[in-house]
Image (tube, grey):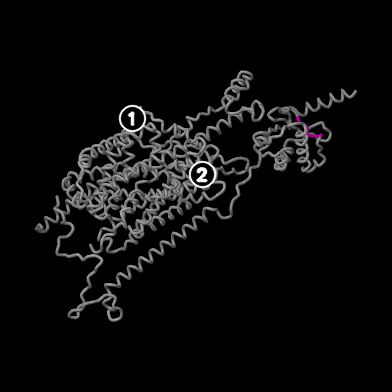
Amino acid sequence: MLWPLFFLVTTIHAELCHPDAENAFKVRLSIRTALGDKAYVWDTDEEYLFRAMVAFSMRKVPNRETTEISHVLLCNVTQRVSFWFVVTDPSKNHTLPAAEVQSAIRMNRNRINSAFFLDDNTLEFLKIPATLAPPTDASVPVWIIVFGVIFCIVVVAITLLVLSGIRQRRRNNKGPLGVEDAEDKCENIITIENGIPCDPLDTKGGHINDGFLTEDERLTPL
Amino acid sequence: MEKARPQWGNPLQFIFACISYAVGLGNVWRFPYLCQMYGGGSFLVPYVIMLVVEGMPLLYLELAVGQRMRQGSIGAWRTISPYLSGVGVASVVVSFFLSMYYNVINAWGFWYLFHSFQDPLPWSVCPLNGNRTGYDEECEKASSTQYFWYRKTLNISPSIQENGGVQWEPALCLILAWLMVYLCILRGTESTGKVVYFTASMPYCVLIIYLVRGLTLHGATNGLMYMFTPKMEQLANPKAWINAATQIFFSLGLGFGSLIAFASYNEPSNNCQKHAIIVSIINSSTSIFASIVTFSIYGFKATFNYENCLKKVILLLTNSFDLEDGFLTASNLEEVKDYLASTYPSKYSEVFPHIRNCSLESELDTAVQGTGLAFIVYTEAIKNMEVSQLWSVLYFFMLLMLGMGSMLGNTAAILTPLTDSKVISSYLPKEAISGLVCLISCAIGMVFTMEAGNYWFDIFNDYAATLSLLLIVLVETIAVCYVYGLKRFGSDLQAMTGRTLNWYWKAMWAFVSPVLIISLFVFYLSDYILTGTLQYQAWDATQGQLVTKDYPPHALAVIGLLVASSIMCIPLVALGTFIRNRLKRGGSSPVA
């Protein structure tokens, strides 16, 4: 007596949930890729959990708070693991619109993923694109900070070198020109003959002796 | 002279300066490419022969000229013959062009270096598109490293005509690069001598670290074996020999005047023959060493891509046929493919067009040189290593050291003649001259930070120095051997260093090197003429790849101007000197 009822239920199931049915979605799991050795076996208990998660997601949608686990139907489970699912309304006669199911799944994607220890790539809802996480943007880009530090160091170093060069040149210039301050600072011994000071011998380099040939004529031209 | 010429603190500084100048980016990104293209291990044969026959003699010649004349390039060639000071002027002009565009590479190096302090590396992930459902379209079509280079770094325009505006980020990096160069050359040899200790040795440290890391990478041996396996038939290819000669020539940096400038700060008794041999051997060994590192990185990248390709094929088959996850592996892929083809022929034929043929050889065959190698291929390999930020920082730091070392030589080539000239150095102190040169080069270099800047960069890279340098070095060799006189030069060197000039150098300078350079010159000229219109590679954002386009007339005019402005210096200055002498002799009585 129960057989016709059972038959009825399965045919209704078969009508509502089959590959490429209206409002049906295909799900694909890659458990071994995600977990390697710790992969669990996909059995009917895992399917029950999945149906529970989908029902949970649907309950979050306004007007669908009464969705039960029995309203979520799975079919065509393959070895991959992949299967199709639909969500029916309380009367179990027709399926809920795909847009509602899609938005519900998208809102709770993280919860569903973590229930199975998977992520967006290993638990795929075909035709439901995942919202990709935006890259974390620092308020100030990191590169500008590093740039600023190095820029300041270089500018400071240049300033120091230029200033020390100027100071050194001023000190060099004051040496031979110490004639005016000869009374105050006797840095160089100035010999004075007939009131005209002789420039002290510059021990650093030589002076050009203009008696010799200039550089252009150093070698006989062509 | 009013004050003594500044000198290197010790001979080691001179060697390090030459090494730092000669070992540059070309060793890292040009030599491995040539090695790969022209027969792997067998390319070393023409390379070493050209080194001994062309590289060492010409390097010794330049160092000897600089050390003997004790002046920058203009003064040195004027001393050899007043009609030939145009050679020095041409060197300065070429060095000026080079320093303008070369420092842009340092700017890019800084850009990548600063961006290496992020997790994840910005070139390892594509940015998201507008509604956050997928990745940016251009990035999808190209790869994330190409996208970061062409879009984020260069913001390149589709063709050279569309100039765009100056991009402020690369412009800032360029200013920093020039400030860095100014800091190093500010005090002349005093500061340069200390900086080159660092810029010459640091790249070797990083290369050694990278060698150890590279050799331990998964798949490195694939690259090494593939690249170094000698293909002896390439020895018969004349292009291999020409490229070996060209590589030696440009890698040593001959003809720019930098070597003359460096050598002019030497003591006259310095043994520059020994130094020439040391520097050229170190330069070539560094090229080979760098290519070992590069090939192991290539091998890693190719293996990684190959395995990724296999994974994609496996995923595609697993999804299409709903096979059990983890059933298909690389080892049983072929048999399963055959099984599926036989069992589900219709479905397999649907999927078949999407199955890519993954081949390790084709991944290894992608030969890249230049900025593409440094900023796209290497970054792609680095992003797949563990602790990629560290490797990235090390790598770009090394690139910066190499680039800065070469820049020091380039600027020395420009500044030494300027500071030697009494006219200029009497008005301005050394710091001001250096500052002016850096400022002018930086201002003109802003052209390369525009959206079309990379195309102009390629123009300068390909044409500013190539033909001109060959001609300059040819005139140099002929000037020393025939105008000044080889015997006279030999006796000068003997008086200076105390060693007689070996017959080998005499033979090379007088006959072999000029012949080699003339043949290279003729080859390149005929190559340019035969190819007709000059073309360039433009980045097409819609397709995500490079397309070939013709240069517009104004770009061709710039190319012509670049080549002509340096080459024309030689005859023009000779003419000018001739006319000036004529006027002098005609106007006044001849000097006794």
Label whose residue precedes the other's in the sequence (1 or 2): 2
- Residue at the spot x=29%, y=51% of the render? B92
The quadrant in which the C terminus of chain B is found is: bottom left
**Residue at label 1?**
B235
Q: Which of B261 and B60 is in front in this view?
A: B60
Q: Nearer the viewer, residue A163 or B589?
A: A163
Q: Can residue B557 be seen in this view?
A: no
- Which residues, given as a range, are shown in magenta? A70-74
Amino acid type, label 2: Phe
Q: Is residue A84 visible?
A: yes
Furthest residue to the top?
B342
Callout in the foreground (1, 2): 1
Q: Is residue B49 above or below residue B396?
A: above
**Residue at label 2?**
B148
Furthest residue to the right?
A1
Q: Horizontal placement of A33 versus A195: left or right?
A: right
**The quarter of the displayed image where residue B134 is located:** top right
Q: Horizontal placement of A38 versus B536: left or right?
A: right
Q: Quick one: SS at disc 1?
A: helix
- State the image coordinates of residue A171 (x, y, percent, origin top left): 32, 71
Amino acid type, label 1: Leu
Q: Is the magenta stretch mostly helix, strand or loop?
A: strand
Q: Does the magenta stretch include residue B538?
A: no
Give how far apart the Cα atoms at labels 1 and 2 are.
Answer: 39 Å
Chain on which label 1 sits: B
- State the image coordinates of residue B175 (x, y, percent, origin top left): 43, 55
